[in-house]
Amino acid sequence: MKKILCWMIVISSVLLYGCATDLKIKDHKASFLFDNAGTRVMNVLAYNVDDGYFNGVINRCAGNGDKVIYLYVGYNKGDGPGTTSFYVNDVFDSAVDGNKVNLMKSRMKAIRKKNLHIVAWVFADDNTGKVNFKDTEALKRCVKVAVDNFDEYVSEYVIALEADEYLSISQVDQLAIYLKSITKDKAIGVHQLMGRYNYSQLGSIDKHYHQYGFNKSTGFIDSQTKKVMGAVGKPVIAAEYDGSSDSVGAKARGDAAMGAGASGTGNGRN
């Protein structure tokens, strides 16, 4: 009876995703910025971004050889295009809008059918005045809504983009511990302001997503990667180093990061 059930689950999963159900990332290769940061891939779940834009961006990522995509799954109203929100009238920590949730789910399914692994970023910067970031319990409720609805499509999580701009190290620790308590065996990362990595030294954080700054030399990328790896003692994702992930410069920088020992890239590589 158990063998039949397992077989039925596998068949169902294949029909749902059109690909293997293993969510483990084996090659962390993403392109979350294009066009000198004019195209922001993380925003494609926004309900007021149309399907044509969504499909165009996803196809562009796949065309750049990506295996992973970064997506906002919690709340982003300040960093366009579009608004990523599952709340009624986009009021943070209010009632959940089922239609918005269903749209986000349908787009995640489409992304998984492209064999792109999803790294879910819960909070975005530039939301001051829209989110009370001092209310940690409200932030946890947002995390729970995201996990309850999207966890089956998600390979890994990142607490926030530029977390130290609006969250304390204690809050990041609390959010990471809480997230681990409601998900299973999924790496939790954090991203900080340019050059910073101290939040990733927390025991609750599994991976560091590093921001180098744009237009840096490949030598700087190499040395900075080695420095940060030594400081955090855990996998480092070279997440942000170029605004045009399909450019020659971006790919050279991504290659330099990988050559230095990074565990993945977020702005393209060869």
Image: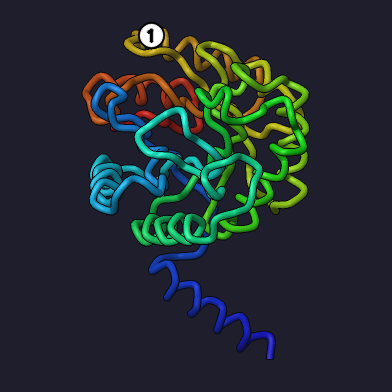
User: Going by the image, does 100 lie left or right of 181?
Assistant: left
Nearest the viewer among 204 and 33 is: 33
Secondary structure of the residue carrying numbered label 1: helix
Residue sticking out furthest to the front: 89
Nearest the viewer among 180 and 233 is: 180
Nearest the viewer among 94 and 261 is: 94
Quadrant of the image containing the N terminus: bottom right
Q: State whether residue 213 appears in this view.
A: yes
User: Going by the image, does 217 lie left or right of 60?
Assistant: right
Figure check: 120 above or below 114: above
Count the numbered circles shown: 1
Say which residue label 1 marks. Answer: 219
The spot of residue 253 in percent (x, y) is 34, 20
Identify the residue shown where x is 49% and y is 72%. Answer: 13
Identify the residue shown where x is 41% and y is 8%. Answer: 220
Q: State whether residue 236 appears in this view.
A: no
The quadrant where residue 8 appears: bottom right
Q: Amino acid at mark 1?
A: Gly
Identify the residue shown where x is 61% and y is 30%. Answer: 131
Q: Residues within 10 Å of mark 1 (few under 14, many from 20)?
A: few
User: Going by the image, does 232 lie left or right of 58?
Assistant: right
